[in-house]
Amino acid sequence: MICIDYQKQILTASEARRNADETITDLRHLFELESLIEETERLKEDRDLVERITNAPARYSFKVDVGNVPPENVEAFLREAKTRMKGATRNPLDD
């Protein structure tokens, strides 16, 4: 009964373990329940990891050489480089 309720997500892992300790006397059944809980928790951890990776924002950094640019024009030069890079990353099929 505990396994069924756990699989239906009526019980949490800690509730299933506590109920099992109080009611199950057959060690084989206790081990089966424990392996079910461990497998479910492992799958949940994997699912959470994949979700964190796929939902992570993309971050890029670029080094732009401004060695020959006069100091008063550096900011404008970097804005221009940024605009050109953003334009280069556009997908032509979106137009």
Image (cartoon, rainbow, N blue to C red):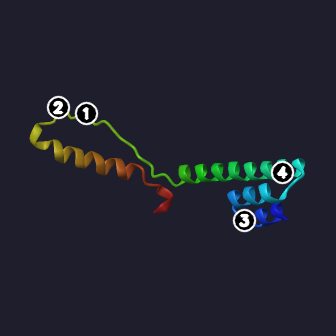
Q: Residue at x 70, y 57 (%)?
A: 13
Say left or right for 42 vs 32: left
Q: Considering only vertical position in the picture, is 75 above or below 95?
A: above
Most foreground residue, 39 or 78: 39
Label 1 amino acid? Asp
Closer to the chain start, of discs 4 and 1, is 4
Q: Residue at x 65, y 48 (%)?
A: 46
Q: Residue at x 47, y 56 (%)?
A: 92
Circle 2 — which element? loop
Q: Nearer the viewer, mark 3 or mark 2?
A: 3
Asked whether the beta carbons under mark 1 and mark 2 sit within 8 Å of each other, the answer is: yes
In the picture of the structure, the residue carrying the numbered disc 3 is 11
- Between the residue at mark 3 and the residue at mark 2, the CA separation in whole angstroms equals 67 Å
What is the number of the mark on residue 30?
4
- Between the residue at mark 3 and the residue at mark 4, the CA separation in whole angstroms equals 16 Å
Asked whether the beta carbons under mark 3 and mark 4 sit within 8 Å of each other, the answer is: no
Label 2 amino acid? Asn
In the picture of the structure, the residue carrying the numbered disc 1 is 65
Residue 2, located in which quarter of the rendered image?
A: bottom right
Circle 4 — which element? helix
Most foreground residue, 63 or 73: 63
Closer to the chain start, of discs 1 and 3, is 3
Residue 24, located in which quarter of the rendered image?
A: bottom right
Q: Residue at x 48, y 61 (%)?
A: 94
- Between the residue at mark 1 and the residue at mark 3, the CA separation in whole angstroms equals 60 Å
Q: Considering only vertical position in the picture, is 72 above or below 22?
A: above
Q: Nearer the viewer, mark 3 or mark 4?
A: 4
Say left or right for 25 vs 93: right
- Between the residue at mark 1 and the residue at mark 2, the CA separation in whole angstroms equals 8 Å
In the picture of the structure, the residue carrying the numbered disc 2 is 68
